[in-house]
Amino acid sequence: MLSKSEIALLVLGVLIILTPPLLVYSTYPDTGGSEAGLEKVLSDLPVKPPPFLIGSMGYGLHRGRDYVSESNIRRVDSSIYAYWPEKNKRVFLMLLPYYVDKASNKVVSGDSLRPMIASGNVTLVVEVFETHKGTIGVIIEVRLTNQTYFTMKRS
C-alpha cells in the first residue's frame, strides 16, 4: 500500500506531465475551425516564403491581400511595420529575399528596397496572415513613383 507521501509525489508527477499540453490547449486562439496551414496558403504566392515563417508560425489565418500607403508605414530600427487604423493594429512587414523591377528586369535584394520603402512615396501590396505570434504581412509588391518591384523566384 502506498503511503501519503508516495501518493502526493505520484499526483505531483501526473500534474507536471499534464500541465504543458493543457496549457497549450487552453491558450491556443479560437479560430472557429477556419485555420489553414501557412505552407498551404503561402504556396499560392509567386515565391517560396522563408522557411522560418512556416516553421515558427505553425498554423494561421490568411487575411488576404491588402494595400499599404506611405502614411501607414513605420520604420523601427531595421524593421518595417504598417499601422491599420481601422483595425487598430500594428503589422510586422516582411521583405522577401529578391524582387525584380517590372520595366528594366533589374533584380534587387529585399534589403536594398528597405531604405526606398522608408523614404516615402510608396505603396505596398501585402499578403496578411494572422498567427498566434501576431499579424504578419509578406510584401509581394513595392510601387514607387516610377518603378514597380515584384517578388521573384530564385533559380
Image: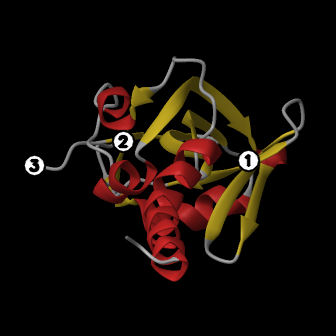
Q: Position of residue 145 (x, y in %)?
A: 64, 41
In this picture, is 29 found above or below 117? above
SS type, badge 1: loop
Sequence-wise, the earlier of marks 1 and 3 is 1
Q: Residue at x 18, y 50 (%)?
A: 154
Figure quadrant of residue 118:
bottom right
What residue would you read off at disc 1? 121
Mark drawn on residue 23: none
SS type, badge 2: strand
Q: Position of residue 137 (x, y in %)?
A: 57, 43
Q: Indicate the amino acid at tag 3.
A: Ser
Q: Residue at x 59, y 26 (%)?
A: 31
**Quadrant of the frame with the N terminus:** bottom left
Single out the residue that lies furthest toward the front.
1
What residue would you read off at disc 3? 155
What residue would you read off at disc 2? 151
Q: Indicate the amino acid at tag 2.
A: Thr
